[in-house]
Amino acid sequence: MIRRLIVSYVALVGVALAAFTVPVAFTLTSQLRGDTEESVLREATTMALLLGDGDAPAREALARMAGAYADETPGTVEVAAADGRSAMPPLPLTARPHDAAFGDALERGRTTVDWGSRFVWGPELVITVPAYARGEVTGGAEGDDDGGAAESGDGDGDREGETGAAAGGTTGGTGEAAGETGEAVGGTVEADDADDGGQAVGSAGPADRIVGAVRVRYATADLTDRLWRIWGFRAILAVGVLAVAAGLGAIVARLLTKPLRQLNDMASRFGDGDLTARSPVTGPQETRTLARTLNQGAERLDTLVASQRIFVADASHQLRTPLTALRLSLDNIADGVDDEFVREDVEQATAEVVRMSRLVSGLLVLARAEAKVSAPEPLALRELVEERLKVWRPAADERGVTIVLTGDADDRARVLAGAGNLDQVLDNVLSNALEVSPDRGTITVRAETGGPEEAVLEVLDQGPGMSAAEQARAFDRFWRGQGLTGRSGSGLGLAIVKQLVTDDGGTVTLRDAPGGGLCVRIGLRTVGDGARWISPRPGAPRSGG
């Protein structure tokens, strides 16, 4: 959920950035293109005026202006005479005087603008302007084919002012050269971009005499660099803003989802059996209401379960005394009766009392295990197993059953288990195994290191085993398998084993043993090398199954 919130927030910021920066970048690009075209067209028009003046001073001024323009800008100037083949000294003839742009300028008096590409621009901007003879220019600025009359200059001062204004976009040297022409004729030609991406046209009237054409080639490398700076700066800025937005989005998302994560943690703990789990009542009103509702439900359930456990524990504890008294009474009766039939009945009653006592003891142990989960402590696995086997070997020897300890777990292997839990687990499993094992059989206890975080304890017997259906139900309370516990079991032994192992964070499973019988596999968490303290193991109540 946090990831989705961050992605949504970043996407929203990205859309806002794109909606703001992309139009601005396009506007700046269009403005850069328009300003460049206007400046170059103004310079070309000024040179065309100087070329149309025709006298030597104007030609020299044109030559100086073209040289200064080439030196101080990325542009070059080319000139062609009216016939398209002759040069106009002192300027050299263009390398391609017969192309279409020169033809339009010399034959039809059209000013052309060619950017070289439909997409932004090509490697150079080419503007070709026709030059009209002195005193014969008619304004064709708007493509007016009717041929409006051109106004001649009123004097040297008027002509110089107009020429200086036309050359205002160039360098100082260029303006100086243009200012020297005192005989230039006033007149302008305007051009507009056409739809074909490269042509701007201004038509002259039919009475105009064209004496030549001026072409300016302006390299667009600098424009491309400026274009990359315009777009690159905004791209870098957008990436930075998105990175900041992602960081802020992560913080905001974690703050917004913190109440939900707390509710999820509470639900997870509750699902794992921790009925004391509660969620903090924080966040917006909706999550606070939900947290209070869940906490109230958990409180009620915890109270009900606790009451049930207390009842079971109290009842079991209270039943132990009368059962003990009843057994003593039966023993006394058996000692004072000589009739074999009566003695047999008393022995059967005593066996049932013993079974009931075991059942009550199992209920008491199970209730205590569910009511309180002790913190796991590091224990030496092999040492604990050896101690429990010493306790059970005398009972096994009475039936000729051999208990064998194998496995690669040594004294350094330590597992995490609650105080007395593993002792009781082994007692229940060994009691079941001894009960179903045939005389002179073998019970194998295998302690191994299953991995860096797990130790495995397996108990294998040679009894009748269990079917798959029986293995699936073996951990149910009060369920007794004929092959596992016969008729004397209480049906609580494996339920207690599972409860204790699960409380310690381990696992317990059943499977068929090789060669027949049952294998009880217990997986326990191990302790890292840093934990060197071994806790004492207090005694724990035992309960057979």
Image: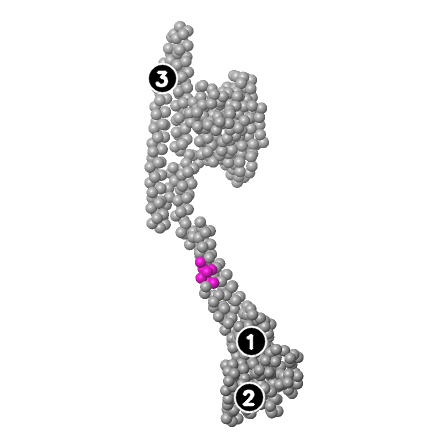
Instruction: Report how far apart the C-alphas of labels 3 and 2 lie in the structure.
Output: 141 Å
Which kind of residue does numbered mark 1 sit on?
Gln
> In this picture, is 479 found above or below 18?
above
Residue 293 placement: quadrant: top left
Q: Which mark is residue 353?
A: none
Considering depth in this image, is 481 or 343 the residue closer to the camera?
481
Give the residue displayed 51% in from the left and 64% down from the top.
Answer: 235
> In this picture, is 198 found above or below 332?
below
Instruction: Report how far apart the C-alphas of labels 1 and 3 lie in the structure.
Output: 119 Å
Q: Which mark is residue 199?
A: 1
Quadrant location of the C terminus? top left
Mark closest to the chain's N terminus, 3 or 2: 2
Residue identifier under label 2: 207
Residue 176 placement: quadrant: bottom right
Q: Are marks 3 and 2 in contact (CB under 8 Å)?
A: no
x and y percent of residue 444 in the render?
Answer: 55, 25
Q: Which mark is residue 325?
A: 3
x and y percent of residue 361 in the render?
Answer: 40, 24
Please tell me whether mark 3 or mark 2 is closer to you in this view: 2
Considering depth in this image, is 198 or 261 the residue closer to the camera?
198
> In this picture, is 534 found above or below 353?
below
Mark closest to the chain's N terminus, 1 or 2: 1
Give the residue displayed 64% in from the left and 87% down from the top.
Answer: 88
Mark closest to the chain's N terminus, 1 or 3: 1
Which kind of residue does numbered mark 3 sit on?
Ala
Which kind of residue does numbered mark 2 sit on?
Ala
Give the residue displayed 42% in from the left and 25% down from the top.
Answer: 478
- Under circle 2, the secondary element is loop
Q: Residue furthest top?
A: 338
The segment highlighted magenta reads 12-18
- Under circle 3, the secondary element is helix
